[in-house]
Image (cartoon, helix red, strand yellow):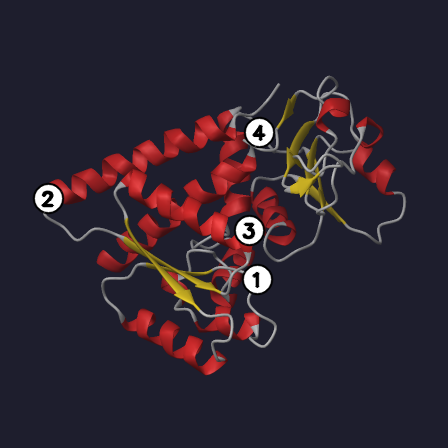
């Protein structure tokens, strides 16, 4: 059965919309997200447009700062420092990837952790590791919300995460551990990957290879969360999982598109609202 991320994300956005409406009715300041887009990466432009639309839908203030591909690292640093000190800004997001002459890690580390709505700052990463309350990366958080939606209890379940990125693989592993799952992180160098995946009650596919996971990798009745955003042989959007091959043997699966993608943006809005509340307290 499909887990409808589109529908769940709309539900969450409507809840945020009501909260912002309430703030407006009380004459309070409205939460604001600033997205910094450097250069002309086509995919990044689409993502940023979607974020802008989502902010408009819920009534959140948003600003897109478009900087030239040739912007100097020092200039970008100045922009971030100015936003860190701007009391009207609650969330700062630097759209990745950045041009090669700019050090991504250095830039992300400069964002005020209280405004780091992507959840990538070392302080927020440490809070996640320690099980403390912080801003959690949006895609992993979205996956937890989808599991809640199908009332899936991870306690004692075997979760296999294929992919070890700082954006998805590692943080989702920690979130599953917090929910008492037994977690295996697999990756491109894992031996007997097929056998490892076949053990999974929940398989999280996050390797960025189109239709890599066929039914030979999946235990019948498993829940499959597909984080991939790939293009197939016909240039159609698809995930890391061969959906047609797998859909009849799993209990639940997130489709691509319409699964985890919409959730990422909904969680970004939730993080911005959370950052706002934390700063207003």
Label annotation for residue 236: none
N-term mark: 1 or 4: 1
Q: Quadrant of residue 112?
A: bottom left
Cα distance between the residues tagged 3 and 2: 38 Å
Q: Which numbered disc, 3 or 1, marks the residue closer to the eye?
A: 3
Cα distance between the residues tagged 1 and 2: 39 Å
| Label 2, residues with CA under 10 Å away: few <14, some 14-19, many ≥20 | few
Residue located at (48% from left, 57% from top): 119
Q: Which residue is mark 2?
A: 26
Along the horizontal axis of the image, is 52 left or right of 174?
left
N-term mark: 3 or 4: 3
Q: Which residue is mark 3?
A: 43
Q: Quadrant of the C terminus?
A: bottom left
Residue located at (56% from left, 70% from top): 104
Which one is nearer the viewer's eye here, 243 or 126? 243
Cα distance between the residues tagged 3 and 1: 10 Å
N-term mark: 1 or 2: 2
Give the image location of residue 52, x and y in percent.
37, 48
Which one is nearer the viewer's eye here, 117 or 160? 117
Q: Which residue is mark 1?
A: 97
Q: Secondary structure under badge 4?
A: loop
Q: Which residue is mark 4?
A: 153
Q: Which numbered disc, 1 or 4, marks the residue closer to the eye?
A: 1
Q: Secondary structure under badge 3?
A: helix
């Amino acid at each position: 059965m499909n887990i409808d991320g589109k529908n769940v994300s709309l539900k969450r956005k409507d809840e945020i919309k009501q909260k912002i409406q309430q703030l407006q009715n009380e004459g309070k300041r409205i939460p604001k997200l600033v997205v910094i887009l450097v250069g002309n990466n086509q995919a990044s432009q689409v993502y940023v447009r979607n974020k802008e639309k989502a902010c408009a839908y819920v009534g959140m203030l948003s600003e897109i700062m478009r900087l030239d591909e040739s912007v100097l690292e020092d200039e970008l640093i100045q922009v971030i420092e100015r936003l860190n000190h701007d009391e009207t800004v609650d969330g700062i997001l630097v759209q990745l990837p950045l041009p090669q002459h700019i050090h991504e890690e250095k830039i992300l580390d400069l964002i005020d952790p209280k405004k780091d709505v992507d959840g990538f700052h070392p302080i927020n990463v440490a809070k996640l590791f320690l099980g403390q309350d912080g801003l959690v990366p949006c895609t992993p958080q979205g996956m937890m919300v989808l599991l809640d939606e199908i009332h899936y209890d991870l306690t004692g379940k075997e979760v296999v995460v294929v992919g070890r990125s700082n954006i998805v693989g590692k943080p989702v592993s920690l979130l599953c551990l917090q929910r008492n799952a037994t977690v295996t992180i697999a990756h491109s160098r894992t031996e007997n990957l097929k056998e490892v995946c076949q053990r999974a009650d929940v398989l999280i596919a996050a390797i960025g290879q189109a239709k890599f996971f066929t039914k030979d990798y999946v235990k019948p009745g498993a829940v499959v969360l597909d984080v991939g955003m790939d293009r197939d042989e016909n240039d159609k959007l698809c995930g890391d999982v061969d959906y047609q091959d797998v859909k009849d043997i799993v209990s639940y699966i997130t489709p691509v598109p319409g699964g985890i993608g919409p959730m990422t943006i909904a969680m970004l809005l939730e993080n911005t609202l959370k950052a706002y509340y934390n700063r207003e307290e």
